[in-house]
Image (spheres, rainbow, N blue to C red):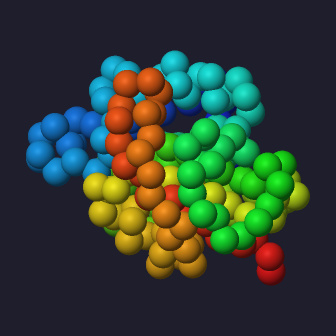
Amino acid sequence: MIRLACAADLPEIGAIYDAVLDREAETGVVYTNWQKGKYPTPDTARAVLEAGTLYVGEEGGRLWGVVNLNNAQLPEYDAIPWSIPAPPEAVGVIHTLCIHPGAARRGYAGKMVAFCEEEARRQGRTVIRLDTWKGNLPANHLYPSLGYRFAGATEFFFQGYIHEILNCYEKSLAL
């Protein structure tokens, strides 16, 4: 089940972020380019929760994933040659989609993306956009496999301390 997050979920959401970053530190295989203690954090999740755009995947009373779905396009999106025209209010944006490493390879990321598409449609959005770090091989494989078009890449100065190249993807929500 995927649902809106609640305040009681925040510790477990923080544990998911930490599990991802701990796995990267342990294995040396880095897909996120996130920084432990800086982004994402429980405070990050709390702000998104308060905005009403934080969703969690849950099974058997345990959270397996978390995502922020809103319409906030980062300023760097202006540098991307989007092919699906849409006014800002018609764009849904997927941010910080994160699956607990212990729940990986079960199709949960695809389920979370499908949920985001349906929720964005319900909200009247006509297109989904997202970005992912160029080094995030699983995500850069996943999104095209789900019908997302690579729209371009550009340098982002994320959160004011992470310089990175992010690949941007888009998908029409027209049925």
What is the x, y in percent for residue 151? 54, 67
Q: Residue at x 22, y 35 (%)?
A: 22
> Is residue 2 in view?
no
Indicate left or right for 125 with 110 as reference.
right
- Camera-side residue: 87 or 58? 87
Residue toward you, 72 or 38: 72
Q: Position of residue 92 (x, y in %)?
A: 72, 53
Taking 72 as reference, is 15 above or below it?
above
In this picture, is 52 found above or below 37?
below
In the figure, is residue 93 to the left or right of 159? right
Q: Residue pushed farthest right? A: 124
Closer-to-camera residue (116/9): 116
Residue occupying the point 52% across, 19% down: 43
Reply above or below: 69 against 87. Answer: above
Give the camera-side residue of 55 and 165.
Answer: 165
The location of residue 172, given as percent across then percent down, is: 72, 72
Side of 155 relative to 172 (left or right): left
Determine which quarter of the picture holds residue 114. Answer: bottom right
Q: Residue at x 61, y 39 (%)?
A: 75
Name the quadrant of the C terminus.
Answer: bottom right
In what quadrant of the picture does the N terminus appear?
bottom right
Report if residue 135 is visible in the image.
yes
Query: Residue sitting at 64 percent across and 64 percent down?
Result: 82
Residue 167 as seen in the image, left or right of residue 128: left
Report which quarter residue 83 is drawn in: bottom right
Residue 104, given in percent of the width and then of the height, sits at 34, 59
